């Protein structure tokens, strides 16, 4: 039996609403009017849902922000195991893409309601990039040599990683990256090109 709203803290109420919202979206999709079904699943009133989360767009925003926080918490130990920039980027991309491919709500949105989900990876991506950069730049910086730090901004590394992950999540390609091993080979190959020194200028 669910606890009554008056017996819960505001944080607990909000989390219950978001848990119910995630389950409802997986069941019925992003296009449904959600407040009634969320309220029923959460065992709360519709006014309570509005009070603690807001309208439908604010529900999407809250779910997205909660998922980002959870994702970064899981990614951190992955990056702490890496001690080189190239392997760290590969580990980051492989983990992030695999996580996204196994994420039921994200995959349902990409499949059934791309107009709602894709902007988070394109037009609305900047806040995500900024937040990810603030969180991840120190983790990438610790992997970098003094020579790399002299020429590469760790914040740029974060943005490279985001753009690669976003592309792999949202766009199909001709190279097989369906398994973690194939994806790792793909990213390693891309990075091997990126680390090739620029050719010396030709004397005229």
Image (cartoon, rainbow, N blue to C red):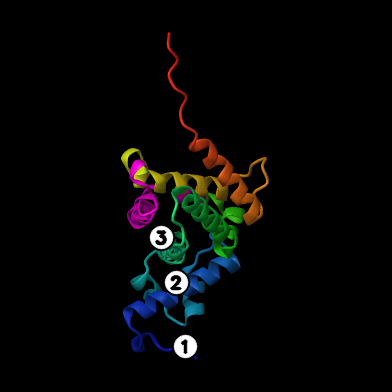
- Residue found 58% across the figure and 42% down from its top: 189
Name the side, left or right, on which 198 lies relative to 98.
left
The part of the image, by quadrant, that contains residue 60 is bottom left
How many marks can you see? 3
Q: Is 128 above or below relative to 190?
A: below
Left of 119 or right of it: where is 137? left
Regarding mark 2 in the picture, which secondary structure is present there?
Answer: helix
Q: Which residues are magenta?
A: 118-147
Question: What distance separates the C-alpha of mark 3 from that of mark 2?
Answer: 11 Å
Write the residue at 35% across / 89% down: 7
The residue under label 3 is 61
Question: What's the distance in space between the residues labelled 2 and 1, CA to CA?
Answer: 15 Å
**Percent position of residue 196, x then y:** 50, 34
Looking at this rendering, what residue extends furthest in the bottom direction? Answer: 1
What residue is drawn where x is 51% and y is 49%? Answer: 165
Does residue 116 appear anywhere in the picture?
Answer: no
Element carrying mark 1? loop
Mark 1 crowd level (few <14, some 14–19, many ≥20, 10 Å Cα):
few
Q: Reading the chain from its start, which is encountered first: label 2 or label 1?
A: 1
Query: Residue 81 location, x and y as percent?
Result: 46, 62
Give whichever of 146, 191 is nearer the camera. 146
The span from disc 3 to disc 1 (Cα, nearest Å) is 25 Å
Label annotation for residue 2: 1
Residue 18: mark in rendering: 2
């Amino acid at each position: 039996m669910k606890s009554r709203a008056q017996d819960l803290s505001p944080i607990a109420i909000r989390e219950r609403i978001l848990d119910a919202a995630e389950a409802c979206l997986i069941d019925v999709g992003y296009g449904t009017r959600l407040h009634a079904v969320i309220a029923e699943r959460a065992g709360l009133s519709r006014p309570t849902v509005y009070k603690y989360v807001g309208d439908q767009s604010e529900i999407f925003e809250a779910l997205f922000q909660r998922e980002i926080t959870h994702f970064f918490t899981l990614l951190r130990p992955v990056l702490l195991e890496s001690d080189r920039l190239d392997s760290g980027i590969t580990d980051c991309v492989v983990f992030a893409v695999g996580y996204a491919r196994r994420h039921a709500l994200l995959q349902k949105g990409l499949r059934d309601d791309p107009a709602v989900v894709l902007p988070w990876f394109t037009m609305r991506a900047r806040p995500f990039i900024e937040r990810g950069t603030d969180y991840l730049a120190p983790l990438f910086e610790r992997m970098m040599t003094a020579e790399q730090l002299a020429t590469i901004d760790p914040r740029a590394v974060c943005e490279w990683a985001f753009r690669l992950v976003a592309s792999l999540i949202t766009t199909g390609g001709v190279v097989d990256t369906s398994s973690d091993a194939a994806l790792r080979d793909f990213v390693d190959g891309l990075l091997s090109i990126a680390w090739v020194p620029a050719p010396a200028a030709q004397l005229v």
